[in-house]
Image (cartoon, rainbow, N blue to C red):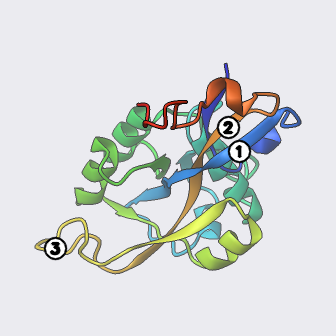
Amino acid sequence: MELAFVQGGLATLADTDRLMTLGSLFFESLWIFHSDRNDPQRLGDLKGLRIAVGAEGSGTKALAQELLTIKAVTNQNSTLLLLDSQDAANKLMKDEIDVACFIGNPRSKTIMSLLRSNSVKLLGINRADAYAMQYKYLRVLNLAEGVIDIVRNIPPQDQALVAPSGQLLTRSDLHSARHFPSAIDHSGLPTF
């Protein structure tokens, strides 16, 4: 494999000596939804709850567990469940779990259905700027009041989210002339 898309922050999970970043391409937010019967205000308030942190090996799991650990939310004081996005969303809607974490685009079917649900709420990241300053691969994204649905006012107030970047990686020994030819051929005409 010569190129790969990777979520920012996952470098600690792989041998990166032979890899090179070609650039950050996009951001995908960390979404934390909770049942409307609990009212956490910050990540530390999730202690003691049943939390879907993402599937094994996923970027969601890596980021969710890293941020939860900072706030001392661990398997010792909470139930951290390894569920894929669809299972987590279904269990949250059925009130079988208390919290579910996702990384994704707000236009995804799963995220959109949770944002529009009356039985779950989005937890904004308190002190998002501090997380982004401490973890250089994170950016703060503001989900503005009403941006999802202006008539129903979803979300009901501005929410700060953190988002890792999607990065394009290559092997450091990949020679640019061999795989990325110039846009100009010898006749001076552009090639496509």
Q: CA distance from mark 3 to mark 1?
A: 38 Å
Q: Are marks 3 and 2 in contact (CB under 8 Å)?
A: no
Amino acid, disc 3: Ile
Residue that mark 2 sits on: 169
The residue under the point 46% across, 67% down is 123
SS assignment at label 2: strand
Within 10 Å of the Cα at label 2, are there few (<14), some (14-19), or many (20+) other Cα atoms? some
Mark linked to residue 38: none
Mark linked to residue 150: 3
Numbered disc in front, either 3 or 2: 2
SS assignment at label 3: loop
The residue under the point 61% across, 31% down is 180
| Residue 94 seen in render | no
Picture coordinates of residue 117 (x, y %)? 24, 56
Closer to the chain start, of discs 3 and 1, is: 1
Q: Nearer the viewer, residue 186 or 69?
A: 186
Residue 174 falls in which quadrant of the image? top right
Residue that mark 1 sits on: 21
Q: Are marks 2 and 1 in contact (CB under 8 Å)?
A: yes
The residue under the point 23% across, 58% down is 116
The residue under the point 37% across, 42% down is 89
Closer to the chain start, of discs 2 and 1, is: 1
| Residue 39 seen in render | yes
Closer to the chain start, of discs 3 and 2, is: 3
Q: Name the quarter where the C terminus is drawn.
A: top left
Q: Nearer the viewer, residue 31 or 88?
A: 31
